[in-house]
Image (spheres, rainbow, N blue to C red):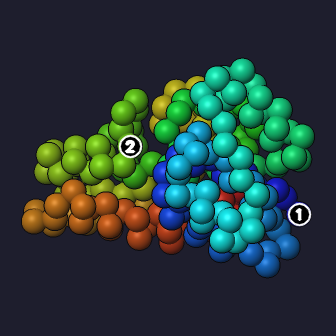
Amino acid sequence: MKNIAILASGSGSNAEKIINHFQGSSKARVTLIASNKKTAYVLERAKKYGVPTHTFNKAELESGQLTELLINLNIDFVVLAGFLLQIPQGLIKAFPNRMVNIHPALLPKYGGRGMYGDNVHKAVKAAEEKETGITIHLVNEHYDEGKIIFQTAVKIDKTDSPDQIAEKVHVLEHKYYPKIIESLI
């Protein structure tokens, strides 16, 4: 049985889908939800499912304290689900090819520092793209530049607002992220 830790900064809808996906699995389970925001709703979602939580600050992330905690908890795989801080080299080295992220666009478009959530959907809309989607990739030392594992697209109508684009992307995230994680484990 593999242990999964999810790092998240926000509401945690993807984290909840991942928890649900692995409930009753003999392959893996979510054993920790960690957040850099004490008020992140993802922590409430975790409690609802009895998943232990941990909060930390940027200094603890950068100093290696979080890495040490994950190692001590025998974490096998790290999943970023709406986690907004850059991952330090020490954490990447501790989980080589065992840390994934999901991006709400078809990378390499609309990636990099500051390109998350509504910022991505507004940029996609402004560029009048005909499609967008999700990219699941390994994490490296650069925002959104790790090896791409999976991409899938959805059509955008000219009349779609950034919020409507976000809804279409969330459907893809919830459908595919847990399955791709399972395939990697």
Of the residues shown, which amino acid type is indicated by label 1? Met
Label 2 close to label 1 by CB (< 8 Å): no
- Residue 57 visible in the displayed image: yes
Q: Picture coordinates of residue 16 (x, y %)?
A: 59, 67
Count all numbered tags in the image, as a single digit.
2
Q: What residue do we see at 16% from left, 45% from top?
A: 127
Mark whose residue sits in front, 2 or 1: 2
Q: Which residue is mark 1?
A: 1
Tell me which amino acid carries mark 2. Tyr
In the image, residue 113 sits, relative to residue 161, either above or below, namely: above
Q: Is residue 114 left or right of residue 33?
A: left
- Tell me, yes or no, if residue 153 can be seen here: no
Q: At which x and y percent is residue 131?
A: 26, 58
Which residue position is annotated with label 2? 116
Q: Residues within 10 Å of mark 2 (few under 14, many from 20)?
A: some
Q: Which residue is depicted at the point 22% across and 48% down? A: 122
Query: Is 57 above or below relative to 75?
Result: above
